[in-house]
Image (cartoon, rainbow, N blue to C red):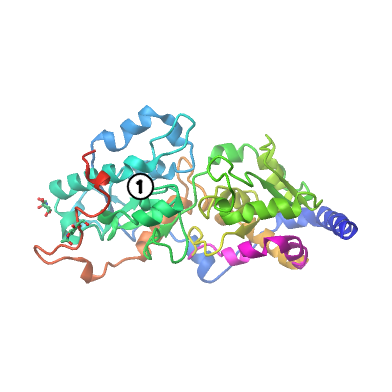
């Protein structure tokens, strides 16, 4: 067994060294729906009105803790900045297709930098109260033509523990709105059918500073850095990553094809560019920044997260660029990956090398055509025109302002 996997590692290494220059120079684009949608230009297809809110809902929070600009939920801030100067912005709310409320619900961090979403529901209620009493647009649809950026682990369920998040459900006042969120899992109470799933924020400049020449061979077969167990939050095991990360470690810690560890080396980004497959297992939530990193660094993402809904899944051909492994099949990971034909691997690498794929994963400053900001707008534009049924009759109410945990009803 050992000898066989060593041998295949050597063969693969030789193969990818020999073909690396060709593999990295050539890129491929999927024509037809996916590739074309990815390059759509949203300008002219929608108009967005940005509400003006007191700075306590956004800028003040950021001033208090500038770390909010670099953590993986920073899209809530960058989307605001992007919209302020975007050509899709309209200052006339009567001609708007979509209304955006600039609020940073995730910018409340512990001393160690972990976001705590416990005040988010009250903050959201307060902001919605404000816009619904100062403008006529909220009451017209009770938010059905409004979108909110809620990038936390379980989106607008506002809790980092899945069980609690499920118990809470989507904040009642947001149940008609379109949610732009990182969380995505099929048939989950925290993902509404109409939501737009986005990539987590990963710092573009920092990543670009670590690019290595594209002709460096990919000599690592499988790469992963991160936790296998979360002893602090899941002392008995089994909840964290539903055991999938533990299974990776227990089955492959001594397998020479697997370069896996909890150490986070300074060469992390470079290593991903030297790897053929990058594991993207679920953690507490189905997604992690590895998904973005793998695409940007051309490492084939191996997605281990049953029922995950991937970012911009209607524009990015995830099935073609990635490999999907069921959580229960983790013990077979070595066989699954070594039996993928070489031409299939090379095609995935060529698709990943397509710059439009990488652009769609990032929130750069300044924005660029085709980046994640534009993909969000494309997603919103594709939901237009709004169905007439979203407009409520005079006096008609759908939402319940007093539903939800009592703690959420306290003023913010
Ligand atoms: C919207 O409805 C709420 C609650 O019914 C009400 O208090 C508010 O004044 C209304 N807003 C406007 C602008 O009429
Ligand atoms: C709104 O929710 C509260 C709390 O769950 C409930 O007591 C009340 O009956 C609901 N109101 C309506 C109109 O459904």
Q: In the displayed structure, does residue 180 sit left or right of residue 49? A: right
Residue 285 in the image: state x and y as whole percent: 50, 52
| Residue drawn at point x = 69 percent, y = 36 percent | 265
The residue that appears at 18% across and 44% down in the rendered structure is 130
The local secondary structure at tag 1 comes to loop
Identify the residue at image location x=55%, y=56%: 356
Q: Considering the image in quadrants, where does the N terminus appear?
A: bottom right
Other-residue count near label 1 (Cα within 10 Å), few / some / many at <14 / 14–19 / ≥20: some
Membership of 316 in magenta stretch? yes
- Residue reaching furthest left? 395
User: On the rendered structure, is 147 left or right of 327?
Assistant: left
For mark 1, what is the residue? Answer: 86
Would residue 232 appear left or right of 398 to someone viewing this image?
right
Q: Is residue 125 magenta?
A: no
Residue 115, percent across and down? 43, 39
Foreground of the two, 294 or 125: 125
Give residue 62's position: percent from left, percent from top: 37, 32
Looking at the rendering, the stretch of residues picked out in magenta corresponds to: 314-341
Residue 324 visible, this orientation: no
In this rendering, is residue 319 above or below 207?
A: below
């Amino acid at each position: 067994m050992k000898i066989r996997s060593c041998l295949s590692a050597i063969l693969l290494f030789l193969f990818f060294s020999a073909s690396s220059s060709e593999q990295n120079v050539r890129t491929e684009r999927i024509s037809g729906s996916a590739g074309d949608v990815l390059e759509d230009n949203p300008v002219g297809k929608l108009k967005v009105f940005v509400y003006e809110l007191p700075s306590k809902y956004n800028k003040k929070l950021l001033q208090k803790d500038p770390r909010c600009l670099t953590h993986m939920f920073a899209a809530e801030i960058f989307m605001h900045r992007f919209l302020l100067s975007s050509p899709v912005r309209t200052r006339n709310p009567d001609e708007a297709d979509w209304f955006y409320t600039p609020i940073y619900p995730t910018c409340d961090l512990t001393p160690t930098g972990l976001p705590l979403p416990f005040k988010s529901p009250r903050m959201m209620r307060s902001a919605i109260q404000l816009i619904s009493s100062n403008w006529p647009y909220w009451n017209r649809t009770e938010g059905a033509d409004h979108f909110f950026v809620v990038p936390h682990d379980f989106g607008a369920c506002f809790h980092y523990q899945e069980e609690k998040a499920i118990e809470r459900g989507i904040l009642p006042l947001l149940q008609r709105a379109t949610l732009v969120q990182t969380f995505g899992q099929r048939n989950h109470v925290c993902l509404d059918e109409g939501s737009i799933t986005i990539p987590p924020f990963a710092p573009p400049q920092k990543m670009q500073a670590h690019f290595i020449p594209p002709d460096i061979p990919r000599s690592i077969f499988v790469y992963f850095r991160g936790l296998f167990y979360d002893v602090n939050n899941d002392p008995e095991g089994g909840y964290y990553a539903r055991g999938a990360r533990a299974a990776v470690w227990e089955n492959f810690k001594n397998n020479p094809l697997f370069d896996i560890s909890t150490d986070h080396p300074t060469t992390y980004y470079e290593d991903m560019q030297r790897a053929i497959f990058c594991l993207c297992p679920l953690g507490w939530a189905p997604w992690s920044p590895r998904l973005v990193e793998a695409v940007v660094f051309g490492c084939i993402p191996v997605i281990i997260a049953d029922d995950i809904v991937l970012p911009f899944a209607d524009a990015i051909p995830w099935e073609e660029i990635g490999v999907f492994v069921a959580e229960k099949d983790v013990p077979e990971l070595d066989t699954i990956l070594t039996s993928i034909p070489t031409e299939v691997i090379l095609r995935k690498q060529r698709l990943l090398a397509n710059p439009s794929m990488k652009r769609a994963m990032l929130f750069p400053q300044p924005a660029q055509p085709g980046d994640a900001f534009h993909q969000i707008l494309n997603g919103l534009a594709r939901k237009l025109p709004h169905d007439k049924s979203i407009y409520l009759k005079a006096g008609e109410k759908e939402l319940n302002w007093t539903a939800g945990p009592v703690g959420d009803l306290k003023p913010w």
